[in-house]
Image: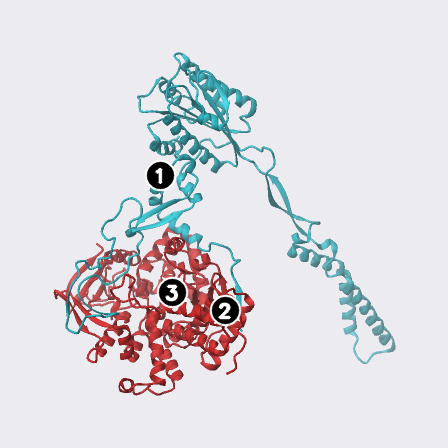
Amino acid sequence: MPYIIDRRLNSKNKNTVNRQRFLRRYRKQIKKAVSEAIGKRSITDMDRGENVSIPRDDVTEPVFGHGAGGAKKFVLTGNKEFVTGDRIQRPPSQQGGGAGEGEASDSGEGDDDFAFQISQEEFLEFMFEDLALPNMVKRQLADSSEFKTVRAGFSEAGSPSQLNVVRSLRSAYARKIALGGKSRRKRRELRMELEALVEPLSDTEVLRKKELLEEIEVLSRKLAAIPYIDEFDLKYNLTVKLPQPAPKAVMFCLMDVSGSMTEEIKDTAKRFYFLLYLFLKRNYEKIELVFIRHHNTASEVNEHDFFYSRETGGTVVSSALTLMDEIIQERYSPSQWNIYGAQASDGDNWQGDTEKCVDILTNKILPCVQHFSYIEIGKRPPQELWYSYKDIQTGVFNDRFDLKAVQDNAHIYPVFRQLFERGVA
Amino acid sequence: MSKREPISTGPDWTFELLEKYDKEIARIAKEKFKLDTYPNQIEVIRSDQMMDAYASVGMPVSYHHWTYGKKYVSTEQNYSRGRMGLAYEIVINSDPCIAYLMEENTMTMQALVIAHACYGHNSFFKGNYLFRTWTDAEAIIDYLVFAKKYIADCEERYGLDAVESTLDSCHALMNYGVDRYKRPVPISAEEEKIRQKEREHYVQTHLNDLWRTLPETAKPVDEPERITFPEDPQENILYFLEKNSPNMAPWQREVVRIVRKMAQYFYPQRQTQVMNEGWATFWHYTILNEMYDEGLVTDAFMMEFLTSHTNVVMQPEFDSPYYSGINPYALGFAMMTDIRRICEDPTEEDLRWFPNIAGSDWLETLHYAMKNYRDESFIEQYLSPTVIRKFRFFALEDDEQNATIDVMAIHDDDGYKRVRQVLAQQYNLSSNEPDIQVYNVNIRGDRSLTLRHYQHNKRPLNDDTAEVLKHMRRLWGYDVRLESVGDNEQTEMFDTV
């Protein structure tokens, strides 16, 4: 009689470990593919998997075998016109000249490439590998909504599923020894006395023997009545809930929307914010986003307006920084929130406003944030804001302030990596 | 024979139906055709589980390694793009014999697979002499579990990278980890565990003796001593490394051993592809036809079955774009069917070619062939002119020194024997794989190891050779050379220095 077993409910992906090993081995190639992909993709598109192809040679495992040449004899099927003794011209290529040979493609998947897909999760993993958030220190006991159950010894009460069998039986055993000790000792003495009585017995001895047997009988019954396990022997595993620090972060996106900012620059900025957002999301369970746009005045807006609505006007950068500071004071207490700021601009600013910016940054914002990054987008040489910010970077808060110049979309990812490279800063 | 009610009519299968079909198939297989099998364990799985099974070369448990990940990734890719279908079944040579059935299969396919795997392959595993000598169906699962755990422990202790690179190197030499002639003694996993401890200790002490670095002062210097080690060339390279490599850690020796054992386990399968598949295909065909004759299955069932069966045994011609060598299912099935024909209905030609079996009891003859041959000898013994004509086989000789490829023989009276001989050689593993053996170790000098390749028909080694030698060097610890020798003269030299 055969066994028929339904294995369909077994866990999926028995091979995930092997798959991980494979990815681990080719991480260099995969990483390259990932960073190329990031350059090409649109931002709404960052969140999915990717096709990766690796040159076939890299993944082949070498074995001893015969090469071309020498003399071989072999049999083929489907003879049509050949007769014994025919001489056939050797085909030009030893490989048989199948279609598609030769042209190794450098993009996409050539026949010579080993192509496969990595999932969204893996994609992000590779994207943010080796990156770390600077100053990721504040893990507040916020909201106390997160609990973790931990073991905390044993208890006398609990649900049957938590019953600790070993402890319970140990306790029962101890109780049995304790309760029965006296009777058992007595019984032992009586038994010794009984053995001491040797035949032939005198009358008193016969009486005594009967007495002894009765007493032993009583004691034995008493001992047998001690319960094998009792209510109060039961021990339960005790677990308690510990509040877990729920790390949460807020990310401020600051952007200049004045006339000088073109759509392209905004798009580049958006990519940067998006990367930062994805990155934070991997590190914090809860993230809030604050969008502040400014021309000569600043306002907090929603995401859509931030990126798409058009405004014109001058540029007063300090207005945005002031607003950010106010919002922090009002809603995001630095003792509870990990605060990240990212400012993107083409570098223009109102004459005389730059000093004010530096002042707000160093005195108000930088002391409470984890990190503040400034990227200047555009192909022009660095502008006024850049030079003043440069000074901050060499100042006290150099560990939490960084600035980088970006020329176009393709630079965003490398710059992002530089900003958050592990170990640096 | 009175027609009975068919077991089922629709395409859907249920566990109940599986059981009913299995019962009938078992009855026919055992009572009518005397197929002797291990008990069956049929497991129904999803397609992704089938891909898992593929990736781990059909092993139900296997140690972790990237190469399995690679196989999985590429199977998954090909499957999801529709480039390939999955096999309907995978069957494992174990006791009980485990067969995987995919849930997507229709009832007809499940019946086909049960007949094919659970009675065809299963009885082959149990009956064929190679499997009987080389594999221990009872112990294999336990051994795999032991191997998996051992390697996982090594990874924890010595790091992923160290274990991975050792395994890489072993895999490169896996085909050279088999004993071709010596007979093994099967042992259980429990014994294996105990012996493993003893081995570690023994090998280490024994090694120290071989690699004694202190000079032996007692020997007079003027007596030149020619020590050859090993005394005779060694064909099992992995075994040689396991026992003699100077610097390998004990755990590495055990890893080498695990890979070697796996290679040995698969060795019979590599030598009996045509027979094994032919046998299984012959039986699913015969059993299901028998069921039809008994009225147990419907006409629709048979139509579907025959369609799949025809696909399985299709043999494209050499100039077809679908040609990818000789289809072992097709050749094996044709030969098995032909043996039955020769027994039952011999022609005048068969009487000349096969006087021993023509007219004999077909079932007995087939069982005898299954038990006592491997592909090479099976073809040499049983390939009939009829089959050669059916496939229109022709033999070619491709000698580098000639400008042309010559047709040696075709399917005519003069050619049958040549064709048969060449085809049989095509399935001879020892002429397909280069003959490479451990030839010498410089034990008193730089400890370098020399491999010798004995050329067969002047065929050179492939481009991987240098890479494989690097792997070998990693396991040996010192330089490794390879001499390629043809007709007693050394022609080529590979070196890791």
Disc 1 vs disc 2: Cβ atoms closer than 8 Å?
no
Q: Mark 1, residues whose alpha carbon is within 10 Å: few (<14), some, or many (≥20)?
A: some
- Camera-side mark, 3 or 1: 1
Check the image and report above or below for A119 versus B356.
above
> Horizontal and vertical percent for residue B107?
49, 66
> Horizontal and vertical percent for residue A296?
44, 15
**Subunit of label 3:** B
Of B42 and A285, nearer the camera is: B42
Q: Mark 2, residues whose alpha carbon is within 10 Å: few (<14), some, or many (≥20)?
A: many
Colour setup of the view: by chain
The residue under label 1 is which amino acid type? Ser
Residue at which label 1 appears: A35
Check the image and report above or below for A149 versus A287.
below
Q: Colour of chain B?
A: red
In the figure, is residue A332 to the left or right of A359?
A: right
Q: Secondary structure at mark 1?
A: helix
In the figure, is residue A223 to the left or right of A152?
A: right
- Mark drawn on residue B41: 2
- Chain identifier of the cyan chain: A
Please say whether residue B209 is visible from this viewpoint: no
Q: Whole-Å distance between the Cαs marked 1 and 2?
A: 48 Å
Residue at which label 3 appears: B262
Q: Whole-Å distance between the Cαs marked 2 and 3?
A: 22 Å
The residue under label 3 is which amino acid type? Met
Q: Secondary structure at mark 2?
A: strand
Check the image and report above or below for B375 versus B159.
below
